[in-house]
Structure formats: C-alpha cells, structure tokens
Amino acid sequence: MNVWLPTSPCTPEACAGHEGSTASVPHALLRLAAAVALILLGILGAPPVRLLPAGPRHRVVRAWSAALVRAFGIRITVHGSPGPGGGRLLVANHISWLDIPLVAAALPCRMLAKSDIRAWPVLGRLAGRAGTLFIERDRIRALPATVEAITGALLAGDRVTVFPEGSTWCGRARGIFRRAAFQSALDARVPVQPLRLTYLRADGHPAGAPAFVGDDPLTASLWRIARARGVRAEISLLPRIPPGRYAHRRDLAAAAQRAVAGLTTTSPDPLPGIPAQPATPSATDRDSANRPAASVHHWVSSSPAAASSLRTPS
C-alpha cells in the first residue's frame, strides 16, 4: 500500500451497519438478480448507445443508472437543476460504489476511476465502455497525464465527475478535498459544480448500509444493500462555481468542499471510534513545499495512510 494515498478511518464495523427493517432473503436475491440483469444489459447496449446523439444518449444513461440504483430498493431524490450544458467538473463527497450510478442518474458524465476497476468482473468492462477515465493511484508520476486527460475531456465539452476526498467515507464523517483535479477546471476554464450525496433511512438519519469503506468486500456490500429496506439516496446539484472566481486550485477546492458540507466551517460530530480528519494539510499538500504553485503537474495532494479505506473509484 502506498503510504501517500488518501485514506479514511471509517470501517465497516463502525459505519456500515443497517439500523432498520430488512428484506427477506428471497427478496434480496431478486434485487441482486435485477441488478445483474441491468449490468449485463448495459454491457450489451453500450456500443449502440454511444452512437446516439448526445440528447437521447444522456436520457438512456440516466434511465439505466436510475434503474440500477432502484433495483436495490433505493429511492432517488434529486435537488437542484443541472443548468446549461457544456464542459464542467463535477465534484462530490464519496460514500459508496453506488455514488457512480447515482450521479449518472442525475447528470450523465464521464467518471474518474482508479485503474483497479478495469479488472473488476463485468463492472470493469462496463466502466470502460462508458468512457471512464482511469487513474493509477499508486503512481504519483502518473498524475500529470491524468490531469491532462481530464482537461482534454472538459475542453471537448464533457462533464467529468471526480471524488476529491480520494477515498470513501461513511457520510457521517468526511475527508478533505484534494486539490489536484481542480487544476483541470482551471486549465480548461470551465465551471466546477459541487454535488452533495447522502443516503438516508426512513427516519431521516444517515443510512449505514450503502457505505463501502475500509476492507469491506464488494460481495458483502452488495448483500448488505440488497437486504436493507427504507433507504433513500439524495443528490443535491449545488450552484456552479464559475471559471475565474478563484485563481488557485487550493481556494477552488476549499470553496467546493464548503459547498458540499453545507456552507459550514465546522465538521460534523464524529462517529464513536472514528477520529476527525485533521484540517492541517500534510507536507505534500502544502503549496509552499518548494513546488511551483501554478500547476498540479509538479505535485500531488496526499496524506500519509493511517488505516483502512482505499475503496474509491477516483
């Protein structure tokens, strides 16, 4: 494990339990079967769908993504408006692998994902056909090429989604937004649109079942979500940050993080046993660390690994 990869202290034991009613085993199996059928349909349908004009293609992607989330019994609520088209960088907090179809259900886009996902059975092939941009998180030297790829996609008019926390958090605790990807928005001179993702139980409290944190196996996460009942996913499309408002990626990342956090300057109460993320940047995250501040091509935002979560597609 690379000691400079962003990590989260959240663990399945502390964060991913489901407090509420559960579906029966046969019902959960039906949910999984429906999800698998949709994924296979997505793989088979991806080539012809990519040939469609942008409007119809986006409608198909939104419908398919929403159906995949709903196949697990999760209701979707979208707040806000996507606004006009054109290239933009979408940045969101990161809780689960469900974040990817949830965002696509509201705003079809290209995702930035870790290169490991290419090797995932079925899902890896689907991600590749969906135009996913892959990043080799273990190789710091690969960062400039990744930033250039994001910039190129933004200049081509694509929406690109990244999860700047760099790792999954449970939703009741959250991480610092890393700055690297924001350089792409500065270079391409496109807006940044923050997205706030939440998963709630029927009583309005945060739902633990969707959290994909720590060393949680994908199979365990799938089964836990399939068994949970009364989970609602909410995505808030927050006001876009126009190009030119911030000249430095540090300020742009901080503004996006404040927006996703609800314009608060304080962190939420930590979960029992979950230490709060320190607000002080690490040595490699400081712009004064003898590196040119004008380009992310010369450095990477990161923090020493303390423990647990590397479960992130970005």
Image (tube, grey):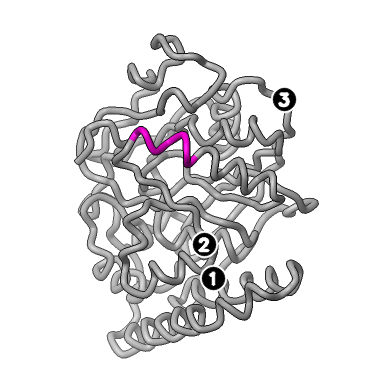
Q: Amino acid at mark 2?
A: Ala
Say whether marks 3 and 2 touch (CB < 8 Å).
Answer: no
Say which mark, if any, is on residue 75: 1
Say whether marks 1 and 2 touch (CB < 8 Å).
Answer: yes
Of residues 136 and 80, the one nearer the viewer is: 136
- The residue indicated by pointer 2 is 233
Foreground disc of the pair 3, 1 = 3
Which stretch did the figure color magenta? 140-146
> Counting residues from the N terminus, which is met first, the one under dot 3 or under dot 2?
2
How far across and how far down the image is residue 271, in percent?
30, 41
Say which mark, if any, is on residue 245: 3
Q: Tell me: residue 177, above or below residue 314.
A: above
Q: Quadrant of residue 307?
A: top left
> Counting residues from the N terminus, which is met first, the one under dot 1 or under dot 2?
1
What residue do we see at 55% from left, 76% from top? 46
Dot 2, crowdedness within 10 Å: few (<14), some or many (≥20)? many
Secondary structure predominantly adopted by residues drawn in magenta: helix
Assess whether residue 79 is covered by the magenta stretch.
no
| Tag 3 secondary structure | loop
How far across and how far down the image is residue 133, in percent?
49, 53
